Amino acid sequence: MDKRLTEGIRRATEEFNHLVSGLSTEAFEASHAGKWTAGQDLNHLIKSLRLTNFAYALPLFMLRMLFGKPNRKSRSASELRERYRKALVNGVKAPSMVKPGRVSHAQRDILLKKHSEATEVLCRRLERLEDDNLEGFLVKHPAIGRVTLREMALLTQLHTEHHTGLLKAKLSGTAAEEL
């Protein structure tokens, strides 16, 4: 397996967690223009990772039964970024199962640890997969539809980077950053 995949996911998580870990109570719990707070972004990323981890824990034959077989090679990170951006522009919203609910500053350190741990679980699962499996099996992404296991890993990194950009924009008081 290409180590750049897991390195990118780990780097994105570390960047997001570093940003959140330095926030005051007020900054962590502040909502800007009706958007999620930093704590809610963090909780959303954890919930999303848990679902992704569940998909990577399923036996490969089950993924084949549920989602079929890919008829193309995996898209590049830039192609996925554009597809994800278009889905966001078209109004795709987080499914209810990954919506964060209320998050207090008192939960921050526990949530940061959970985020790091969930990222490590995903990276370990990815590292066990052969490149043929990353290309040869599909899962369903809530915004884009059926994607290869490699694409889902890239989308996990892009998703974290997206929330990092959104949080930086909220904290600086600028317009929301696009992917």
Image (cartoon, rainbow, N blue to C red):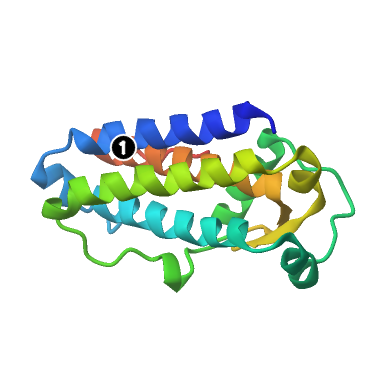
Residue drawn at x 82%, y 50% as measured from the top left:
136
Residue 174: tell me if it is visible: no
The reply, left or right, for residue 49 in relation to residue 174 is right
User: On screen, 146 above or below 16?
Assistant: below
User: On screen, 20 above or below 102?
Assistant: above
- Amino acid carrying label 1: it is Asn
The reply, left or right, for residue 158 in relation to residue 65 is left
The answer to which quarter of the image holds residue 97 is bottom left
Residue annotated with mark 1: 17
> In the rendered image, which quarter contains the N terminus?
top right
Q: Position of residue 123 (x, y in %)?
A: 53, 41
Residue drawn at x 73%, y 60% as measured from the top left:
60
Q: Position of residue 149 (x, y in %)?
A: 69, 50
**Toward the viewer: 47 or 58?**
58
**Toward the viewer: 70 or 174?**
70
Residue drawn at x 28%, y 59% as measured from the top left:
34
The reply, left or right, for residue 129 in relation to residue 31 is right
**Toward the viewer: 62 or 70?**
62
Categorize mark 1 by other alpha carbons within 10 Å: few (<14), some (14-19), many (20+): many
Q: How many marks?
A: 1
Q: Tag 1's secondary structure?
A: helix
Residue 157: tell me if it is visible: yes
Residue drawn at x 52%, y 47% as measured from the top left:
122
The answer to which quarter of the image holds residue 88 is bottom right
**Toward the viewer: 11 or 144?**
11
Q: Position of residue 173 (x, y in %)?
A: 26, 37
The reply, left or right, for residue 174 in relation to residue 79 is left
